[in-house]
Amino acid sequence: MKLPAKAPEPNSENTPFFDGARQGRLVLPRCGDCGFVIWFPRQICPECSSQDVSWFEASGKGSIYSCTVTRRIPGGWGKVTPFVLAYVELEEGPRVMTNIVDCDPEHVSIGDRVEAVFEEATNRDGESGPPLLRFRVREG
Amino acid sequence: MSDDYSLRGKVAVVGVGETTYYKHGQSADPEFVLVLKAILAACADAGLDPKDIDGFCSYSNDRNDPPRLANALGIPELRYSNMQWTSGGGGAAAAVQNAAGAIVAGSAEVVVAYRGLAQGQFGRFGRSGGSRPVSGAAAYTLPYGMMSAAQMYAMRTTRFMHEHGVGRDAMRSIAMACYHHAQNNPRAVMHGRTLDEETYDSSRWITEPYRLFDCCLENDGAAALILTRTDRAKDLAKPPALVLAAQQSGGHRSGATAENTTDYVTSSFKPAVKHLYKQAGVTAADVDVVQSYENFTGGVVMSLIEHGLCTYENADEVLTFDNLRADGGTLPLNTSGGNLAECYMHGLGLQVEAVRQIRGESSNQVANAKVALANAGPMVPVASTAIYGAEEVLG
């Protein structure tokens, strides 16, 4: 079943990430001083406090670090249970909260290799917003 | 550093009070009245006049602020008020710590640590609002259906179980011990409702690996503890429960939800425990009874390991129902029924129960309990933990 897709509201700190999402590209911030790949997007490196942060295109590949199959929850999400909420560890290092989609929730587990997909999303006014970064299980 | 920079034994809990504990939304009293009732009950327990109170400490953005409480109680001097910020009830022991610190510093003499909530009046705690703006950190969580603490900590528990291969059996034992203790506790919301293995195993999944009985209750009520100098406690009504140690516990980037917590597979107690036993002057082996905050049972397993009460290797063998019982167990746990079966007063009830154990007043009294540990808020960004002791522990 299609999961709800509420569009995030970009601000000046994360615009390149969401602009990338609109093009189907995973664009992440990286510290120019210590090399730390930052998640979630910030202008100041949380490791070394440098403000020399720039953006690069990441592979979009990673693996499931942890996950939970949610089966009971109030509200709109209660209509799409069971669904998989997960942390995906990207090849570039950060762990990202996300959903695993196009999958059988009974057969998703830690260590599964996944790849990024960008799903259309709408904001509170029903207008198209930045797509959501989700993941699906990767073959091979 | 001089020993003078330690709380150890300088301050005692001299009064505890609780309202009737109600199921979610069932209190006829408004929240503010519940808090006043708990404070008055604690004063009566201590043998203190409410007008003796000159300080207030709470946590988790409690809505009942000290100036308002002081007005309602007719307090002549409000010398100290304090709020500890954290997620959930992680600040329950921190409120005690802050109260004790204020007394040691001479900022106030009689300080109340309190917490109240009436969810019928103000809505459920910990539920993400669907109308919250999807911006800031929420832009990386809300769109994924991360709506509850249960989900966030389910993922942490899943990772813990994956890395250490323990926890499933222990989680069930913890839930059963809480319900077992609630049967002797007339205050407990689940008094009269038992839980056996079969009922637990067949209960519905909420979000894996949590079943219904792994999750804390939702309640209305209030609780309060009154603290003062140990040397003043001698003149009061009840034997003092000394604060041997109390610590807050935040680690590197532990405040991260959507971000990358450096040490993910943790109950958040590692930073505090380093200081806790040292300050208390006791070891894990000296702890007679434990009140370990159950937002979710998986967090209790991690908490007990990080407090040195069992290990990653033997958690499932040590944390059995028989061992966790007050009646004969080696590691009596949550002897009031705790957040799962007594009441979820955001963990302050567990601090109260630790005091009762030191006094010998628990409905599931552990014989000769002299050292009681009570922690708060596993897995939250900043947790807190305390050790209480009988006067003779100071030697």
Image (cartoon, coloured by chain):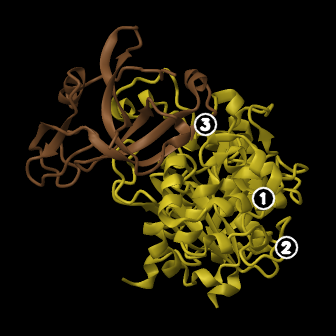
User: Quick one: B386 or A106, which is closer to the camera?
Assistant: A106
Can see residue B40?
Answer: no
Chain colored brown: A
Left or right of B220, for residue B78: left
Left or right of B392, for residue B45: right
Q: Which residue is mark 1?
A: B176
Nearer the N terminus, badge 3 or badge 2?
A: 3
Q: Are marks 3 and 2 on the same chain?
A: yes
Q: Mark 2 and mark 1 in contact (Cβ < 8 Å)?
A: no
Q: Mark on residue B125?
A: 3
Under circle 1, the secondary element is helix
What's the CA distance linking mark 3 and mark 2?
Answer: 33 Å
Question: For the residue marked with disc 1, what is the amino acid?
Answer: Met
Q: Mark 2 and mark 3 in contact (Cβ < 8 Å)?
A: no
Q: Quadrant of the N terminus of chain B?
A: bottom left
Q: Which residue is mark 2?
A: B327
B287 shown above or below B194: below
B235 shown above or below B156: below
The quarter of the picture where residue B74 lies is top right
Residue B163 location, x and y as percent? 47, 63
Residue B141 location, x and y as percent? 41, 34
